[in-house]
Image: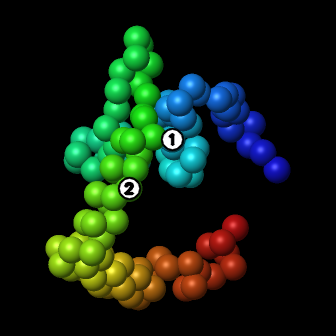
Amino acid sequence: MSSKYARVRKRTAVPGGWLTIEQFCDLLQICEATFYSWGRRCLGPDVTWIGNTARISPDAMRAWDARRREYQQTKEAKLEAALRSKHAGVAGKLSAASPLHVSRRTEEQAS
């Protein structure tokens, strides 16, 4: 089932395997906002501008993937993941304890 708001992207072969930002996002199944967020934090792949179109080369994708895998093995990344997990647990407990939580709604409130 597709949403009436879903964008249909034309997937075309790019010479040499270069991808547009849209194609890269489709490949990774991420939204473009995530891609641009990575770019602002210098975590995304290197982008080359060809005319008015941004392209990502196969070499840039491989280098980005290697940097990403290397970072995941660092102590800093593991501490960050543990901290996120801890915060998610605390947020879940606070949410469940709230009188507004969905599990505490009566049938009158649900309507």
In the depicted structure, whether residue 49 falls above or below residue 46: above
**Which of the numbered marks, if any, corresponds to residue 24?**
1
Q: Residue at 57% of width from left, 47% of height from top?
A: 27
Amino acid type of disc 1?
A: Phe
**SS type, badge 1:** helix
**Which of the numbered marks, if any, corresponds to residue 85?**
none
CA neighbours of label 1 inside 10 A, class few (<14), some (14 to 19), many (20+): some
**Which of the numbered marks, if any, corresponds to residue 65?**
2
Mark 1 vs 2, N-terminal side: 1
In the depicted structure, whether residue 61 falls above or below residue 23: below
CA neighbours of label 2 inside 10 A, class few (<14), some (14 to 19), many (20+): some
Q: Is residue 44 left or right of residue 9?
A: left
Query: Which of the pair 20/111 is nearer the observer?
Result: 20
Q: Is residue 109 left or right of residue 19?
A: right
Res. 91 in view: no
Q: Quadrant of residue 111?
A: bottom right
Query: Which of the pair 36/51 is nearer the observer?
Result: 51
Q: Residue at 24% of width from left, 41% of height from top?
A: 40
In the depicted structure, whether residue 32 falls above or below residue 90: above
Q: Is residue 49 left or right of residue 96?
A: left
In the depicted structure, whether residue 38 falls above or below residue 72: above
Q: Residue at 33% of width from left, 58% of height from top?
A: 66
**SS type, badge 2:** helix
Residue 63 is situated, as x and y percent measured from the top left of the image, at 33, 49
| Distance of label 1 from label 2 (alpha carbons) | 13 Å
Q: Residue most toward the left?
A: 76
Q: Residue at 68% of width from left, 38% of height from top?
A: 6
Q: Residue most toward the top?
A: 51
Amino acid type of disc 2?
A: Asp
Of the residues tagged 1 and 2, which is closer to the observer? 2
